Amino acid sequence: MARLQAVKVTHSVRSRRVDDRFYRHLVSNLRTGVLAITRNGLLAVMNDIAYRSLGLPPQTNDLGRPFTEVLVDCPEVIGVLQAAFDSDDLPNRAEMRLRRTGKAIGYSLSRIYDDDGQAAGATLFFKDLTQVEQLEERERLRDRLATLGEMAAAIAHEVKNPLASIEVMAGVLRRQFRDREDAHDVDVREQLDDIIKEAKMANAIVVEVLEYVRPIQLQPESVSLIAVLAESVTMAEGKIPRGSVVMDMSVDPDVPDLTADAHQLRQMFANLIANSFEAMGGRGRVRIRARLLMGEVEPLGGTHSLPSRVRVEVHDDGPGISADDLERIFSPFFTTKPQGTGLGLAIVRKVVDAHDGTIHATSALGHGTTFTVTLPVTPIRPLSFTKDGT
Ligand SMILES: Nc1ncnc2c1ncn2[C@@H]1O[C@H](COP(=O)(O)OP(=O)(O)O)[C@@H](O)[C@H]1O
Ligand SMILES: [Mg+2]
C-alpha cells in the first residue's frame, strides 16, 4: 500500500512538472507581452516580449521579487497592476503609452482566481501598437495631403500663369536687345537673363511642391525595371549635370516586371540619382543594383512567407550624410543646399508608400550613401488609379 502510494506520488509529481514546463514555454513563446503578479505583490510571470516592450533587461532573479521593484522604471504599468484588486471593472483593450520606450501598447488586465474562487493574482496581457499607430499616422498624413493638395493645386495654378508670362515677356525683351552691344544694353540683357533664370527656378519649385502635395494617383501597368532605371538616369541628368560620374547598373536576370506606375517610379529613382549627382559634384561612382527577394521574412513579421519583392539599391561614394541629418532627410523642406527645396526625398517616400514599398537610407560622413528601396512585385492591395488619368 505504502509502495503504491509512493509510485502514485512520483507519477503525479512528474506529470505536474511536465505541465509546468509546458505552461512556461507557452507563456514565454506567446507573441503578446505577459506579466503576472501574485495577490501579495510578487512578480510571478514576465515573458521576453514583456521585457522588450517595456525596455527592461531580463534578469533571472526577477520572478518572486516585488513587482513594484522590478517595474520601478515603468510607473504607469505599476499603476495598472495595482488597480487589479481595487475594483471589478478591469480595463479590457485599453491603451497607454510607455514613457520609458515611447511605445504605445494595448492591454487587458485580468484577475487570476484559484480553485476556491479567491483572487490569487492578476495578469496583464499587452501588445505593442507602435506599428499600428504608424500605419494610422500614415493614413492621416494621406488625408491631410489630399486636402492640402487641392489647395496647393489651386495656388500653383494661379502662380504658374504669371510666372510663365514673366518668362515669356522677359524673353521678348531680351530678343529686342539681342544684337545691341553698348554697355548699357549688355547690362539690361544680363538682368533679363537673371529674370528668366529665376522665373524658371520658381516654376520648378512650384512644380515640385505640386508633385509633393498632390494626392498620388497611380496608373499601374506592367513595368520593366531595367527600362525604368535607364530612363531615370536620363531624367536625373536633365536635372543635375552628371559630369564624369561613372554609372554601374545591374539588374539580376530573375527580376520580373513589376505592377507599378512607371512614371512615378521614374520620378522616384530620378530624384535619388539626381541627389547622388549633386552630392558628388561631378566626380565619383553611382551603383544601382536590383535583385529579387523571395518570401524572406520581415524581422517583425512572424513566420508567414511574404509575396516576392524587388530590392533596388542606389549607392554613391559621395560625401555621405551625418547621423543627425540622416534622421531628417525624408522630411519635407529639409535641405542642406542653398537652392534646394527639400522635397525630392519627400516625393520619393510618397511614391514608395503609394506602391506599398519601403525605403531607408544608410550613410556616414565620408563614406557614401545607400538608399534601399523595396517594392512588391505585385501589390497586395490594388493600387489606386483613376480612369480619367488626372
Ligand atoms: N546621395 C546623397 N548624398 C548626400 N546627401 C544626400 C543624398 N541624398 C540626399 N541627401 C541629403 O538630403 C537632403 C534632402 O534631399 P532632397 O529631399 O532631395 O532635397 P534637396 O535635394 O532639394 O535638398 C539634401 O539636401 C542632402 O543634404
Ligand atoms: Mg533632391
Image (cartoon, rainbow, N blue to C red):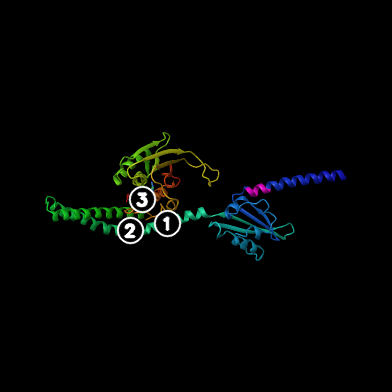
Please say whether residue 25 is one of the residues in the magenta stretch.
Answer: yes
Q: Residue at x 43, y 38 (%)?
A: 291
**Label for residue 344?**
3
Q: Residue at x 25, y 53 (%)?
A: 200
* Neighbour tally class for label 3: few under 14, some 14-19, many 20 plus, Cα within 10 Å: many
Give the dominant element type of the magenta stretch: helix, strand or loop: helix
On the image, numbered disc 2 is attached to which residue? Answer: 152
Residue 116 lies, with reference to residue 284, above or below; the image says below
Separation (CA) of disc 1 from disc 3? 18 Å
Q: Amino acid at mark 2?
A: Ala
Nearer-the-camera pick, 214 or 209: 209
**Quadrant, the N terminus:** top right
Cβ of disc 3 within 8 Å of ligand 1? yes
Q: Position of residue 132 (x, y in %)?
A: 50, 54
Of badges 2 and 3, the one in the foreground is 3
Farthest right residue in view: 1
Nearer-the-camera pick, 339 or 261: 339
Please say whether residue 357 is one of the residues in the magenta stretch.
Answer: no
Separation (CA) of disc 2 from disc 3? 17 Å
Farthest top residue in view: 253
**Label for residue 231?**
none
On the image, numbered disc 1 is attached to which residue? Answer: 141
Of callouts 1 and 3, the N-terminal one: 1
91 on left or right of 121:
left
What are the residue bounds of the magenta stretch? 23-28
